[in-house]
Image (cartoon, rainbow, N blue to C red):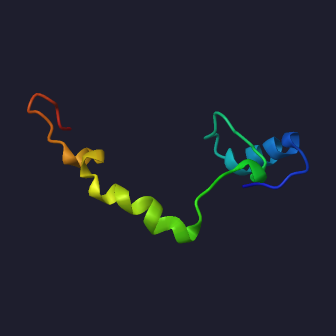
Amino acid sequence: SVHAADATMALENARELYTRRNEGVSIWVVPAAQITATAGDEKDAFFDPAEDKVYRHASFYKLPPEVDQM
């Protein structure tokens, strides 16, 4: 996150902070009031159900023999 007086300054601050190593190709800035996020105390209820869905992990699937495993 960055702090700025306006959107232009926010983009400049984000560019300075996040693209020092020429890694960035696009930067988005939005007012913090427009961000919806989960609360820390919601972690278990929000993320625990994913643990019982092992099919969502690539390691669940077996590769067929014809696929090269480098």
Task: Give me the residue at 69% from left, 50% from top.
Answer: 35
Say above or below: 69 vs 17. Answer: above
Please give left or right for residue 5 compared with residue 68 in the image: right
Task: Give me the residue at 30% from left, 46% from top.
Answer: 56
Report the number of discs.
Answer: 0
Give the x, y percent position of residue 25.
64, 33
Please give left or right for residue 31 compared with residue 40 in the image: right
- For the residue pair 45 and 26, the one nearer the viewer reads as 45
Give the x, y percent position of residue 27.
69, 39
Quadrant where the N terminus is found in the figure: bottom right
Q: Which residue is situated farthest in the top direction here?
A: 66
Q: Which residue is situated farthest in the front direction here?
A: 45
- For the residue pair 48 and 57, the one nearer the viewer reads as 48
Say above or below: 52 vs 13. Answer: below
- Quadrant of the image occupied by residue 11: top right
Q: Which residue is situated farthest in the right direction here?
A: 5
- Quadrant of the image occupied by residue 58: top left
Quadrant where the C terminus is found in the figure: top left
Say above or below: 27 vs 14. Answer: above
Q: Which residue is situated farthest in the bottom direction here?
A: 41
Give the x, y percent position of residue 36.
65, 52
- Quadrant of the image occupied by residue 40: bottom right
Task: Give me the residue at 68% from left, 48% from top.
Answer: 18
Give the x, y percent position of residue 17.
73, 51
Say above or below: 55 vs 49. Answer: above
